Image (cartoon, helix red, strand yellow):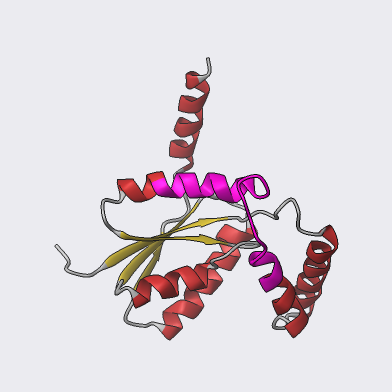
Amino acid sequence: MSDRVTGVVLVGHGGIPKDCPSDLVMKLKRLESQRRAAKQPPSPEEVELDARIRHWPRTAATDPYRSGLETVAAAFQRELKGTLFALAYNEYCTPTLEEAVEGLIRQGAQHITIITTMFTPGGSHSEIEIPEVLAQLRTRHPGVILSYAWPFDLNLVAKTLADQVQRFS
């Protein structure tokens, strides 16, 4: 048995708070799209808008996605029986995946498993963005093992969905 300190990061998509002005989000998405097309790093304006939206004040009423994911995270953390744990979001919320991993490293985690709530293939977050962030983190922290628990076994996902349908049948 390894004596490495382990951690887990649960990554959700992230939601836009209901009271966040839509013009801010549209402007952020436009800047992101232009940047990706030009294959450039984020502009200071994009970074500022992203931070503003991510740090927007939230309640269960204004961001039910975040509230729901926090409920799932609390139950998941109990299942991990004392393993270091952090929650992260791909967009619109804090902390970012990078911030969550860095936080676990500061707590002494030497092996961190990252898992997402995005179960199916084809999504840019799960297939592209999360692996890109992990590649950057591996470069900065070569002594830390970062494992990405993805892709999911789609037969197990189907079984979970079928079990849910049975609960309501």
Q: What percent of the width, then of the height, locates residue 13?
A: 60, 55
Q: What percent of the width, then of the height, locates residue 161?
A: 51, 31
Q: In the depicted view, which residue is nearer to us: 62 or 13?
A: 62
User: For the point 83% across and 63% down, which residue is it?
Assistant: 26
The answer to whether residue 58 is left or right of residue 160 is right
Q: What percent of the width, then of the height, locates residue 142?
A: 36, 83
Whether 153 is among the magenta residues is no
Residue that sits furthest to the right in the current view: 23
The answer to whether residue 1 is left or right of residue 55 is left
| Residue range corresponding to the magenta coloring | 51-74
**Taking 147 as reference, is 60 above or below it?**
above
User: For the point 44% across and 85% down, which residue is it?
Assistant: 140
Q: Quadrant of residue 42?
A: bottom right
Residue 119 visible (yes or no): no
Whether 64 is among the magenta residues is yes
User: For the point 45% across and 26% down, which residue is it?
Assistant: 163
Q: How many marks?
A: 0
Quadrant showing the N terminus: bottom left
Q: Main secondary structure of the magenta part?
A: helix
Residue 32 visible (yes or no): yes
